[in-house]
Amino acid sequence: MSPSEPAVRPVVLAHLTDPHVFLGRPSPAEALGKRGLSYLNWLRKRRRLHRGEITAKIVADLQAARPDFIAMTGDLVNFGLDREFEAGAGWLAALGPPERVGVVPGNHEAMASGFEAAMMRHWAPYCAGDDGTPGFPWCRRVGGVAVIGLSSAVATPPGMASGRIGGGQLSALRRMLAEARSEGLCRVVLVHHPPTPLTVWRKSLMDREALCRTIAAEGAELVLHGHTHMADLSWIDTPAGRVPVIGTPASGMVPGTTYDPGAWRRLTVVRDGNGWRLTLQERRICRDGEVRDGPHLVFRLPPAGAAGAEVAPVVARA
């Protein structure tokens, strides 16, 4: 890649999240505790909201657009079972090859302690950086864009769906953001739980303020998240400007519920002066079963700010 290429070639990212694909139900022994409560919720409500046939249409539409990179921000599975992770690897392989697909886990992957080993055994190529080493955070360079994946997935007690990143990941994130800034790249951070106050406490990112401080200190141009099942737009205010925090609806959500209908987002990033321009095009499922254009938005992303700006950013929902 020539040094000038990031400035002239647009990069197209696809954001897909929260498919909740049904890949197996827990056995009676596995249904003890939190998994059992989740299974009851699936029987009572979730299986009617998250439809596999809708996700299939959304994925087919996404693949037809041939994006440069697909960002999948968690809750691919429902119960965090080993056989779900195994079947999920086949689902990911059908979505795209590891070099074009990156995954971060959500709270449904973390349904029980020890989930990391099973997840990484089956999904490692999709949870790895440019050097092929699996783990979080990972960083993939796609043209002039650095995509950085964080894990907010932690096992929590019944009734909780919160997340946490932790100091180790935040330290590594800071280094990755600084390195990508020095390379002149547009930095896109992926995380399942939103880093802004969009959810109730029991579903929130517990160390979101620490993540916002890290982004304010080192800079980032964009954050993509899942978890809320809504088309969310919020912001992190930093010394360099407002960083958009964008949530995409759950891919298989049926139209006509209290949530936004199933969708994916096409995000086109191109150099614009000393900053970046982001064009967002949503493709959503309609009541007639067809996938059509949803909202179309254009953002002027902030230029990279000076390193070491220690501020407490303001977070807000649009």
Image (cartoon, rainbow, N blue to C red):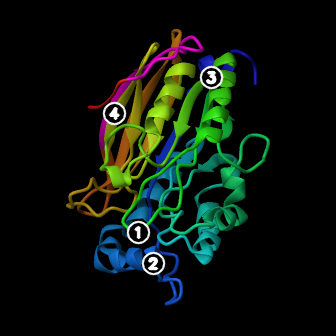
Residue indicated by mark 3:
185
Q: Compare marks 2 and 3 and give the one earlier in the sequence.
A: 2
Percent across and percent down for residue 169 are 63, 40
Name above or below for residue 310 compared with residue 141. Answer: above
Q: Does the rendering let one see residue 285?
A: yes
Secondary structure predominantly adopted by residues drawn in magenta: loop
Q: Secondary structure at mark 3?
A: loop
Report the Cα–Cα distance between label 4 and label 3: 22 Å
Report the Cα–Cα distance between label 4 and label 1: 28 Å
Q: Compare marks 1 and 3 and give the one earlier in the sequence.
A: 1
Q: Secondary structure at mark 2?
A: loop
Residue type, mark 3 in image: Leu
Query: Which quadrant of the structure image shows residue 307?
Result: top right
Question: What segment carries the magenta color?
Answer: 294-313
Q: Which numbered dot is residue 33?
A: 2
Q: Which numbered dot is residue 184?
A: none
Q: Compare marks 4 and 2 and give the one earlier in the sequence.
A: 2
Residue type, mark 2 in image: Gly
Report the Cα–Cα distance between label 2 and label 1: 7 Å
* Horizontal relation, residue 292 to residue 29: left or right: left
Q: Residues within 10 Å of mark 2 (few under 14, many from 20)?
A: few
Location of the N terminus (image quadrant) = top right
Report the Cα–Cα distance between label 1 and label 3: 41 Å
Q: Which numbered dot is residue 234?
A: 4
Contact check, label 4 and label 3, Cβ < 8 Å: no
Q: At 38% from the left edge and 43% from the top edge, which residue is drawn?
A: 247
Name above or below for residue 222 compared with residue 28. Answer: above
